[in-house]
């Protein structure tokens, strides 16, 4: 991965981590606020529900007190309209708006909210029929043309004999709904088959709960109280703030990303070019001369002062390495005494010729060993021995072709590789060399110099060791046969 991408990714990871943490904190704060808001709504729902319950209890309590009064029982038996009116009128409150005393035939004997209105028949009303049949009624029904919360109860003389019905009702209107929702942020709506009443003109509600299972009536089908929100400003402010913060974070992140990209592109790209040159050189994708050429191009095209200094230093270093590399290569491949190729270089050349031989390019090998060289060293000293080696090397070098490869194999041994040479040609050359050495007169060594020659020719599937071994065996045979001779592999 390139340096540009590494820095970009690492910086982006840090920025993402910072922004992710910020987003997490904002979201956590919002969720905490939302949870508090939810708890508040639940609490307010409980308050409204409790007020419903208290309203119903107020209706039941008023009906229970009146139905247990001896005076009311007496007035109901005697049809005393005035006395029943006076008693029921005392119990009228904002939570108890209608109190009716009804005989067993459904005829109204007295109304607490209207002194002179009685005598009408309510026998067909659901609340009257259910109270007469089951003893009580609690629900929603129409009373005097208004949908009301109604509690009706059968009145018994001495707790046994039914003598009439008392109904206590609260008209369902906007005032009643407003009183139930007072002090909360909730709104209440009442829905029935006849009407819809609400404390708010906004619909629909948000986060609605219904109480139809408690307040379902008979004549008013599917009468439902819905409790919910129409105003969401408290949480909406946090939602808007959260959205604005998220948008701000996204904008900042985008600006930083663009700025980072252009900064890196300007200052890192040129540096990356130099680094890539060094990497390619290290991984042997470029040689030193190519690297110097590319570095010179970077130096002429880059605009950053720091990169120019680095490129100039790298260029100077590369030029010094290039200037010394040839000398180092020469030293590493040349025998210091004779100036011929050393064994390492000859082995490399032999490997190359073996690869060429596999492509049907034949070649021959001549192993050369100076006769009685140990005696020369022992008798005349190593200095004369070294002179003999140099003298022989010069004579051999002067006698071979330019394409031939001659090297010192070790000690007094030389190895000659003859490309594109037949066995006959190799033997002929070996004999010429032997004769030339035999005729040569050395200025530092008083005796004649001779050498033994072992000749081998490339065979398919040969390895370096096999080929050299055959040449060495041939050389040994030449030594064994009296030296100063040429032998061909068996």
Image: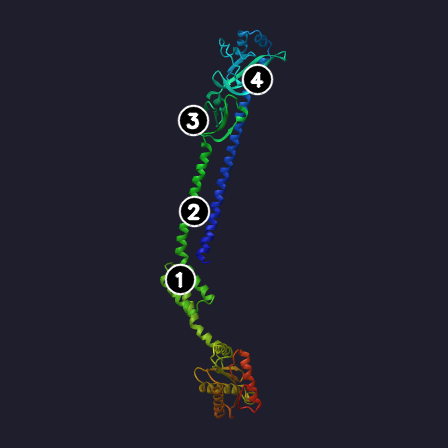
User: Would you name the residue on which mark 4 appears?
Assistant: 131
User: Would you name the residue on which mark 3 appears?
Assistant: 201
Separation of residues labelled 1 and 3 (CA atoms): 77 Å
* Residue 78 x %, y %: 57, 6
Separation of residues labelled 4 and 2 (CA atoms): 72 Å
Q: Callout 4: 10 Å neighbours few (<14), some, many (20+)? A: many
Sooner in the amino-acid sequence: mark 2 or mark 3: 3
Q: Is mark 2 on a helix, strand or loop?
A: helix
* Residue 46 x %, y %: 54, 27
Q: Is mark 3 on a helix, strand or loop?
A: loop
Q: Callout 2: 10 Å neighbours few (<14), some, many (20+)? A: some
Sooner in the amino-acid sequence: mark 1 or mark 4: 4
Q: Nearer the viewer, mark 4 or mark 2?
A: 4
* Residue 272 x %, y %: 43, 59
Sooner in the amino-acid sequence: mark 4 or mark 2: 4
Q: Nearer the viewer, mark 4 or mark 3?
A: 4
Residue in front for this viewpoint, 459 or 466: 459
Separation of residues labelled 1 and 2 (CA atoms): 34 Å
Q: Nearer the viewer, mark 2 or mark 3?
A: 3
- The image shows residue 76, relative to residue 351, as above or below, that is above
* Residue 252 x %, y %: 42, 45
User: Would you name the residue on which mark 1 appears?
Assistant: 309
Separation of residues labelled 1 and 4 (CA atoms): 105 Å
Q: In which quarter of the image is residue 287?
A: bottom left
Q: Callout 1: 10 Å neighbours few (<14), some, many (20+)? A: few
Q: Which mark is residue 253?
A: 2
Callout 4 touching callout 3 (CB < 8 Å): no
């Amino acid at each position: 991965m390139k340096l540009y991408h590494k820095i970009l990714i690492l910086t982006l990871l840090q920025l993402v981590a910072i922004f992710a943490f910020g987003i997490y904190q904002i979201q956590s704060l919002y969720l905490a606020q939302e949870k508090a808001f939810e708890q508040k709504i639940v609490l307010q729902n409980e308050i409204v529900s409790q007020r419903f319950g208290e309203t119903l209890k107020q209706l039941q309590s008023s009906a229970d007190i009146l139905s247990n009064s001896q005076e009311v029982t007496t007035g109901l038996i005697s049809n005393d309209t005035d006395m029943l009116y006076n008693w029921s009128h005392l119990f009228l409150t904002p939570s108890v708006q209608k109190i009716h005393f009804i005989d067993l035939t459904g005829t109204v004997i007295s109304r607490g909210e209207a002194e002179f209105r009685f005598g009408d028949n309510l026998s067909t009303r659901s609340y009257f029929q259910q109270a007469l049949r089951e003893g009580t009624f609690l629900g929603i029904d129409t009373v005097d043309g208004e949908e009301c919360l109604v509690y009706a109860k059968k009145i018994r003389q001495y707790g046994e004999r039914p003598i009439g019905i008392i109904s206590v009702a609260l008209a369902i209107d906007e005032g009643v709904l407003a009183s139930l929702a007072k002090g909360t942020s909730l709104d209440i709506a009442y829905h029935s088959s006849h009407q819809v009443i609400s404390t708010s003109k906004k619909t629909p509600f948000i986060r609605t709960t219904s109480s139809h299972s408690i307040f379902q009536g008979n004549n008013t089908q599917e009468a439902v109280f819905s409790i919910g929100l129409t105003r969401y400003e408290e949480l909406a402010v946090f939602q808007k703030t959260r959205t604005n913060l998220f948008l701000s974070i996204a904008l900042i992140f985008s600006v930083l990303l663009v700025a980072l990209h252009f900064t890196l592109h300007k200052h890192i790209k040129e540096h990356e070019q130099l680094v890539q040159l060094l990497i390619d050189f290290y991984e042997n994708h470029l040689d030193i001369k190519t690297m110097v050429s590319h570095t010179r191009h970077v130096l002429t095209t880059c605009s950053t002062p720091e990169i120019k200094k680095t490129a100039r230093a790298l260029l100077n270093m590369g030029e010094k390495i290039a200037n010394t590399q040839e000398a180092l290569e020469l030293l590493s491949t040349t025998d210091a005494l004779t100036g011929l190729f050393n064994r390492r270089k000859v082995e490399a050349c032999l490997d190359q010729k073996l690869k060429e031989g596999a492509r049907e390019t034949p070649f021959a090998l001549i192993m050369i060993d100076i006769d009685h060289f140990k005696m020369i060293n022992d008798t005349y000293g190593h200095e004369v021995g070294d002179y003999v080696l140099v003298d022989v090397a010069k004579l051999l070098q002067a006698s071979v072709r330019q394409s031939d490869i001659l090297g010192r194999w070790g000690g007094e041994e030389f190895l000659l590789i003859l490309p594109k040479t037949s066995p006959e040609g190799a033997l002929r050359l070996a004999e010429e060399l032997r004769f030339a050495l035999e005729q040569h007169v050395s200025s530092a060594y008083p005796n004649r110099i001779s050498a033994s020659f072992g000749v081998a020719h490339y065979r398919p599937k040969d390895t370096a060791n096999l080929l050299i071994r055959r040449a060495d065996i041939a050389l040994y045979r030449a030594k064994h046969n009296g030296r100063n001779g040429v032998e061909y592999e068996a």
